[in-house]
Image (cartoon, grey):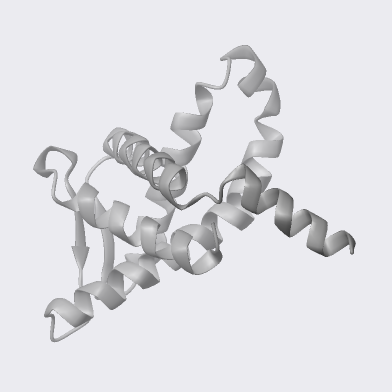
Amino acid sequence: MSLIIRLIVNAFAIWIVTLIPALQVSVIAFPPGGDLQLVLTLLLIALIFGLVNAIVGTVVKLLAFPLYILTLGLISFVINGFLLWLTGWVTSGWDWGLRIGDFWLAVLAAIVIGLINWVAGMFFRPSADARAARRSRRHD
């Protein structure tokens, strides 16, 4: 998936998570509010989440590699929840952003976001024929 599509899918997934009241995840839009500000806020939160995941997530996943082996990968749910919680913490300094009630709710929200990304990846991933054609064009 291209970067723009991933950004849009993450923004959509974060929006879906905010609709589940039990998770206590909310998005505070840019002032004065409204639909356009909510969409822009979700896109910016998705961008920050992607940056946190790329920078901090890479380091944490590298350091937690033995835990991945011990837990057969189940620690990834906790790490992804931590990264989502960290994104909420980063945006809490402004009057807009992601607000998460509890760390374990962030873990559940990250699981839902991961499921939405997985389903979207099935739809937006290029077929094997398209990938092979792209590889052959690179080598020509």
Instruction: Pinpoint residue 99: horizontal percent, then vertical percent.
Output: 25, 57
The single residue placed furthest to the bottom in the displayed view is 32
Instruction: Pinpoint residue 4: horizontal percent, then vertical percent.
Output: 48, 69
In which quadrant of the rendered image does the C terminus lie?
bottom right
The correct choice, above or below, for 99 with respect to 85 in the image is below
Q: Quadrant of residue 135?
A: bottom right
Horizontal placement of 70 versus 105: left or right? right
Instruction: Pinpoint residue 31: horizontal percent, then vertical percent.
Output: 18, 84
Q: Quadrant of residue 137?
A: bottom right
Q: How many marks?
A: 0
User: Residue at the location (16% across, 45% down)?
Assistant: 24
Horizontal placement of 79 versus 111: left or right? right
User: Residue at the location (56% across, 15% down)?
Assistant: 71
Horizontal placement of 35 versus 65: left or right? left
The correct choice, above or below, for 41 with respect to 132 in the image is below
| Closest to the observer, 119 or 44 | 119
User: Residue at the location (45% across, 30% down)?
Assistant: 77
Instruction: Pinpoint residue 38: horizontal percent, then vertical percent.
Output: 20, 73
User: Residue at the location (63% across, 53% down)?
Assistant: 130
In which quadrant of the rendered image does the N terminus lie?
bottom right
| Closest to the observer, 139 or 3 | 139
